Amino acid sequence: MTLLELIIACAILMILSSAALPIAKYSIIRQREAELRRDLREVRDAIDRYKDAADRNQIRVEIGSEGYPPDLETLVKGVQLGASSDRKIRFLRKIPVDPMTGQAEWGLRAVQDDADSTSWGGKNVFDVYSKSIGTALDATKYSDW
């Protein structure tokens, strides 16, 4: 009788554990998607703060850049605050890692680029997107976020 009870208990545990694996898989994907949304929001917020500072003439910008940063490294390294000040203002601590690709490389768009463009004009950074070719749980592409 004891051997039969042990076999039944093991079978029940195997069924329950096999049901838990897909749940764990989707929770990991959801966590990575939430991290991607947070990282995109962080970088886009830093671009907006740079643009606001440029519009208020707190920082010097290149002519023709329309007040947007020339690249993402500028947001990390910082720019000189004011014309004669030695202070620098930084907008990001570091460029976040794209959780879908595992690299700190993002697709960039300039003001002159189309909204769905995948090539960067090279003059300024107006928007960022993920370089991942994967599809999210809600059936949208990560690169469209």
Image: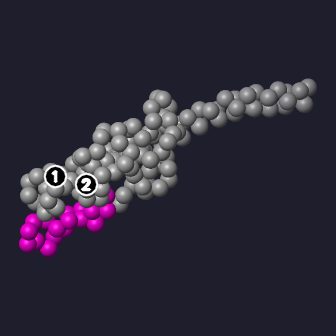
Q: Which residue is mark 1?
A: 66
Mark 1 and mark 2 lie on one chain; the one further toward the N terminus is 1
* Residue at position x 8%, y 58% in the image: 57
- Asked whether residue 84 is drawn in magenta, I would say yes
Residue nearest the observer in this picture, 118 or 102: 118
**Quadrant showing the N terminus:** top right
- Residue 123: where, in percent of width, then height? 25, 56
Q: Contact (CB < 8 A) between labels 1 and 2?
A: yes
- Asked whether residue 121 is drawn in magenta, I would say no
* Residue at position x 50%, y 53% in the image: 102
Q: Residues within 10 Å of mark 2 (few under 14, many from 20)?
A: many
Element carrying mark 2: loop
**Magenta extent:** 72-91
* Residue at position x 25%, y 54% in the image: 124
Q: Which residue is mark 2?
A: 124
Three-letter code, disc 2: Asn
